[in-house]
């Protein structure tokens, strides 16, 4: 009756493990776990697959299944490394492709095999490398986004100069500043590079500048090479638009060799329900790290977003949890960071954190340099 | 006090409109609407922005705000076309970038200006063009995914041959068949092209073959050009990994000139809650069309996914709703299509639909050609 022939498959035996939360009573949850094993691999009626290589090696395997609360279970499912084709997009596809369309399932954690991880270079700089670049061995980093949309390249450069003079560690474009006619990318980037360099020459600091390279597919690498040539010292990428794998592509490129900031725009929906989607730990931590982010911008638990303290703790974990040879990275909380919140935030993020400050930095006084210097002064005492 | 200078801005006056659903009592909902106007544009304290160009032209504008039920409102917010920079990624970013991270907000519909739409080519073929290519002026189309992972290139080619012989309109790779060692892309694609051509020569039909080109960034265009050279007659792209803008890039390329199927893997979470995220109408309809899909694969309301009949009706609408010069496209429902469901589905999808059949196609009998022919026979009577 079966259309699929029975035959042996050549596989290494190395497997990667994925932890999912599943809602439902025990019977329903177990059926959902079994469904993941099929939906994420063969996506084919399991009863039509004979004994043999496909059933043995291609099907996902339930490794553990346990209750974590009323009608709430966690399961670890393993997959043969080969199913990923050792390519990042297909790896994500096995982990959460089709089941992103199913309710009651949440991706909680990745535990990739050393063999699979050996195909990933991960963050080029990571915490230690970025600290070295900036020359700041210990304290939390401070970075800001220049904005708003509507300012000219000259005005943005002027703002960057003033902020760099105050000693912020990194200046980046706002994620909404792309290539609008008000401040086109190729006009803006060289001006800001120059402004930040001028400030660095005065302060002796090494403030980095990371432009936002959001743009059409055809332009992305071209803009990056243009920016590199112009002298930028970092880049910001938005994987919600360019894809996580593009971040990997840029991180791996020796001719680019720049620290990467990722911004989660258009990806937030994954985390919003505790009942489905992708947990903060994976989305802002493990996935951004696999992609090669050095700083993963994320909503802070204090401010205008709705992440909880626990959500942010899990992101901090995801940025540092052992993942083979992958370097640990900075969580980059933003969305309402104020000097008053530093004391509490140190209990969540520790010191390996990059605080994204903007609104409150502009609110303190009309003197941006003085405001930036005050933020820096405070952070130095943390 | 303000750091932002007051100055006039040169804008066209053309604006695009976005409809959002907002939860909360009237006061809360109105505050959330006002917040969208800021969060999606200047992302900066509004009170620090003086009268003048930025306040007048860059801020989003609430055009309408009305109750649609208890603690449920809908608002239309307009944005100056210039904010998008006339680039697709930044357009999506204005529409739903940062607020994807906020609860109680759902993206319901896009109403783009003619001027902005003139920067988009949209689907190359659309319903009429794809019908002409296949030679089928009227009835619903039938397509299938060859699988499972683990089969060799030869076995997949054999399966394709048998299915094409039965007269299916399109054969595509399963979205999980990427570049695994079992059937590497460059080995698989030419074999399947040949198999489908051989079947076409016998049947006189023009069954298309669309490989799945999921792969690392560096390989995507290379694989597409390789496939084109090998003679494929369609392509499948997964915007959850390659980005929606890559679909646009491929759709616009005259040297590729192939119909595109998009698959929503890793994007389903957007639609799962009726309270936040992106509505089915936008995600599977309007956005895929803007990107240039000719068929938008989507979960059917009958089968193993959880979409409702209404959800699927809205997708059908989003595939055909007037959007300037953009062609209408085929919704591609899948996930448990059976011959028994055709009668009801015609009331949801009409005839401009492409049914993605797979599991049930393999279950009917061990003779794949006979099964495919029977599906075709049934669809011809719809």
Image (spheres, coloured by chain):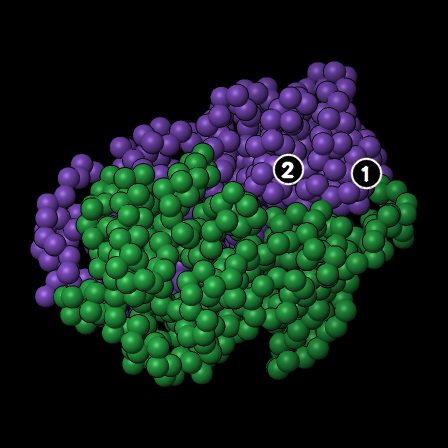
Chain colours: A green, B purple
Give the quarter of the image for residue A153. top left
Secondary structure state at the residue bearing disc 2:
loop
Query: Mark number for residue B152?
Result: 1
Q: Chain of mark 1?
A: B
Residue at image x 11%, y 58%? B50
Q: Real-space Cα distance between discs 2 and 1?
A: 15 Å
Q: Quadrant of the C terminus of chain B?
A: top right
The answer to whether residue A221 is left or right of residue B337 is left
Task: Chain letter for mark 2, please.
Answer: B
A11 or A212: nearer the viewer: A212
Q: Residue sitting at 68 percent across and 42 percent down?
A: B178
Q: Quadrant of residue B225?
A: top right
**Residue designated by label 2:** B212
Residue A211 location in percent, x, y? 36, 49
Q: Are marks 2 and 1 on the same chain?
A: yes
Residue at 39% from the left image edge and 69% from the top image edge? A141
Please, is residue A261 above or below residue B156 in the view? Answer: below
Q: Considering depth in this image, is B12 or B67 the residue closer to the camera? A: B12
- The number of numbered badges drawn on the structure is 2
B347 horizontally vs B190: left or right: left
Q: Residue B80 placed where, x, y %?
A: 22, 44
Regarding residue A187, the answer to whether it shows in the image is yes
Residue A238 drawn at (x, y percent): 44, 51
Mark 2 and mark 1 lie on one chain; the one further toward the N terminus is 1
Q: Residue B293: image x %, image y %?
A: 50, 35
Q: Quadrant of the N terminus of chain B?
A: bottom left
């Amino acid at each position: 009756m079966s259309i699929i022939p029975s035959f042996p498959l050549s596989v290494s035996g190395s497997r990667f493990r994925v932890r999912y939360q599943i809602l439902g009573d025990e019977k329903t949850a177990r059926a959902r776990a079994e469904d993941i094993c099929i939906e994420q691999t063969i996506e084919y009626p399991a009863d039509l697959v004979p004994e043999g290589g496909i059933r043995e090696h291609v099907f996902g395997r339930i490794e553990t299944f346990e209750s974590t609360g009323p009608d709430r279970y966690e399961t670890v499912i393993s997959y043969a490394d080969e199913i990923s084709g050792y390519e990042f997009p297909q790896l994500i596809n096995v982990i959460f492709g089709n089941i992103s369309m199913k309710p009651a399932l949440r991706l909680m954690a990745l535990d990739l095999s050393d063999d699979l991880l050996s195909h990933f270079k991960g963050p080029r700089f990571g915490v230690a490398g970025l600290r070295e670049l900036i020359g700041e061995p210990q304290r939390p980093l401070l970075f800001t986004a220049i904005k708003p949309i509507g300012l000219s390249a000259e005005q943005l450069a002027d703002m960057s100069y003033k902020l760099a003079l105050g000693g912020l560690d990194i200046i980046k474009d706002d994620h909404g500043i792309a290539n609008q006619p008000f401040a086109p990318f190729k006009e803006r980037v060289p001006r800001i590079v120059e402004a930040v360099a001028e400030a660095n020459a005065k302060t002796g600091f090494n403030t980095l500048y990371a432009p936002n390279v959001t743009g059409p597919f055809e332009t992305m690498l071209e803009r990056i090479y243009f920016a590199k040539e112009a002298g930028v010292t970092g880049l910001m990428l938005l994987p919600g638009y360019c894809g996580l794998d593009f971040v990997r592509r840029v991180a791996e490129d020796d001719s680019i060799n720049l620290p990467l900031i990722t911004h989660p725009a258009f990806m937030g929906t994954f985390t919003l329900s505790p009942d489905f989607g992708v947990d903060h730990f994976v989305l802002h931590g493990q996935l951004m790290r696999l992609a090669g982010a050095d700083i993963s911008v994320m909503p802070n638990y204090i401010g205008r977003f709705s992440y909880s303290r626990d959500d942010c703790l899990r992101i901090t974990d995801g940025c540092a949890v052992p993942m083979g040879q992958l370097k640990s990275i900075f969580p980059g909380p933003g969305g309402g960071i104020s000097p008053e919140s530093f004391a509490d935030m140190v209990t969540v993020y520790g010191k390996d954190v990059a605080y994204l400050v903007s609104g409150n930095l502009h609110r303190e006084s009309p003197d941006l340099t003085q405001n930036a210097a005050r933020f820096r002064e405070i952070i130095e005492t943390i």
